[in-house]
Image (cartoon, rainbow, N blue to C red):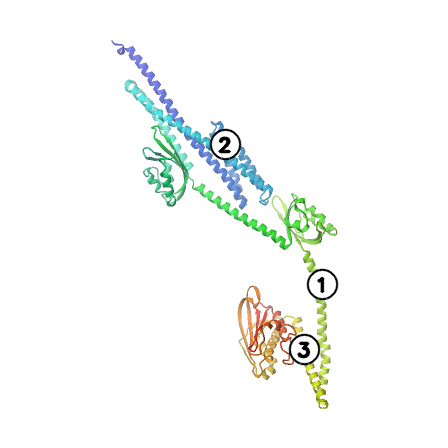
Amino acid sequence: MKFYEKPLFLKIVFIISIAIILFVSAVSFRHINNLNKSNDIVEHSYVVYANIQKLYSEIKDLEIDRRNYFITRDKNILIQIQSDVSTVNNDINALEKLMNDNPKQIKNVKLLRGYFKEKITVVEEGLKYLNLKRDNPLVVENIKKGSLVMEKITFTINKMVEIENNLLEKRLDDNQQVNRFTPIVNYVTLFVTLFILIFAIIKISKDINSLRDSNSELKLAIESSDMAEQIGDFGIWQYNIDKDEFNYSDNIYRMLGYEPNSFDAVIENYTNHIHPDDLDRMLEIAKQLKTAEILGPNSYRVIRKDGDVRYFRGISKVVKNLSGERVMIGITSDVTEEYYNQLQLEHKNIELEEKNKILFIANETSKEAEKIGNYGFWKWNVDKNEFEFSDNIFRMFGIDKERFNPLVDSFIPSVHPEDKEFVMQYLEKFRNKEKNVAPYQHRIIKADNSEVKYIRISSKPIESQDDFYYLMITQDITEEINNSAEILQKNRELEASNKELQAFNYVASHDLQEPLRKIETFISRLEARDYQNLTETGQQYFERIKVAAGRMRLLIKDLLQFSRTNKSEKVFEMADLNEILEAAKHEIAESISDKSAIIKSEHLPTLKVIPFQIQQMFINLLGNSVKYSKANVPPEIQIDYRKISLQQIGQLVLPAKKDFHKFTFSDNGIGFSEEYSQRIFELFSRLHNKDEIAGTGIGLAICKKIVENHKGYILAKGKPGEGAVFEIYLPEDIA
């Protein structure tokens, strides 16, 4: 029997076969374990990367909420800030657990935790400065701290991302090497199986069981990867450059609104969903798939199956598979929420910039207003004994702002010595937080002793949860005080003048009229008894005396009428102006008859007026038209009326449109030049010689005063030889 046929040989072969199978099995088992570990490590890198991005996003959300709180002061946002802080702390702890196998990353996590604590400190510090101006050194320093901390956080996170990307690249290479070794193991196993058939069944059986376990683990890994994609809202795609084949992960389909594998994995089916406005740009990028090593990141819009527009961001890199084929692996993320958050943030920033501009303009306007209004603003926090003074405060006191200690007691040396005790009493009221401190005034002496000024201080208490402070206005009232003194002196002079006028009025109404009546009586007796006995010259003198006495009688009458218009009680009554007009015509019926005057009038309204004054105005206007009529031409007087709304009367501009009753008196008399349209209403103003046309020059002045008593306006227009027009405007709300 040959040796290979002997049982010993078979035993040896059996032992060798078992040894080989055991060796191959061991190698295979180790290889599968390495493959599983490699997949787990790759998956772990993706999870770590996703958690880093999530943590950075949450830190940015905290910064956005902080800015929103500064803008809106919404208490709900403050609660959200606290929630953000808790979430970030939890995620940092979770990230530390995920990275416990990487000393470098553990170090970076500790740095990140320290920087975040600095960030929390800066945020809490900034909340204390909400009531301070933006240019306050504390606020500026807080903003600088916040920016510096965010730079540290951003740098640390970028460093962590870089480390994870390097690890991912290395782990993918390791995974490829493991995958590359798989065919060799399989070939060895097949070779051994062919030559050792008896033992192949056992080996195959063991391999099948092992493969079943591996498939289960692989399925679990795939499901975990798919879950991670859904949670992270991203998908993975592969493009085999050598074979021109695409492969999409299930979540790519879901991101487009489809069930997995709903359409063929070709680039045309994907690009059909790209927004038309971004399509040309993305097609140009797609042309680089076969030549580029790295693409992206690129952002673009897609239109989902349901019509919803989403924002995607893609990044890809070329690797080689186990077959040595060039494969581009890409990650596509749905960044719609991030885009809108960024858009909202930019919008908020724009709004903030606009508000800052408005605040700047308002601040500058306020400064100019302080200068123009001669006042200054200051704030006194009683609890903290802190003060803020506007620049004009220092100007008013003549104090150098740069050398001034910002305390209220520092102003005491500027207070007039006679007013210091008074001022100290008021300061004590403020220190006691009295809420109804009345405005007060006192004198100050400017720092250079150049002048004494009067100032008025007004206050408004503001009580918050933490502080009690006053908003104070200090106004320079020196000019007001001086003007008041001048007005008081003028009032005294006017009172004296009024007393003199009253005395004159008494003299005119009693002392002057009595001798005038005697003069007229004697003139009448002389004219009846002795006129014929006078010489021709004496008769001429007598006529002149008679005319002078009549003119004096008319002058006294008109002066008394004007005085009555000025001092009479302004009792307004509802009166029919048509009846008043008829009464006026009756008063001057003789003059109307002598001149054969024709008076035409529209229907006049019933108004609340001073009846006797309106009647006097009608008498004067009608009498004026009759008096200044053309020789041998009967006077024609037209009275028109209408209700109008005006914003301007003559040269006078009214603050707003008002309703007026307009009365127009027009005649065909001798008229007057337009240059006299204002002078004609002056007291004793006459445009004609007294010998030509009798009169005192008081009648139209009386008309103007009556119109003013009714809060109205009167205008005069005329042309020589063409007549005169008088326009009277009485407001709707006369009384």
Along the polypeptide, which appears first: circle 3 or circle 2?
Answer: 2
Report the residue marked by disc 1: 489
Q: Position of residue 428 (x, y in %)?
A: 70, 47
Report the residue marked by disc 2: 93
State the SS at label 2.
Answer: helix
447 displayed left or right of 48: right
Along the polypeptide, which appears first: circle 1 or circle 3?
Answer: 1
* Nearer to us in this view, 268 or 49: 268
264 displayed left or right of 45: left
**Amino acid type indicated by mark 1:** Gln
* Nearer to us in this view, 165 or 587: 165
State the separation of the CA atoms marked 3 and 2.
Answer: 107 Å
Q: Which of marks 2 and 1 is in front?
A: 1
State the separation of the CA atoms marked 2 and 1.
Answer: 83 Å
Q: Can residue 162 be seen in this view?
A: yes
Q: How crowded is mark 3: few (under 14 residues within 10 Å), some or many (20 or more)?
A: some
Report the residue marked by disc 3: 555
**Amino acid type indicated by mark 2:** Asn
Q: Position of residue 50 (x, y in %)?
A: 44, 34
Q: Where is residue 647 in the image (x, y as percent from the top left)?
A: 55, 65
Residue lying farthest to the right in this orientation: 418
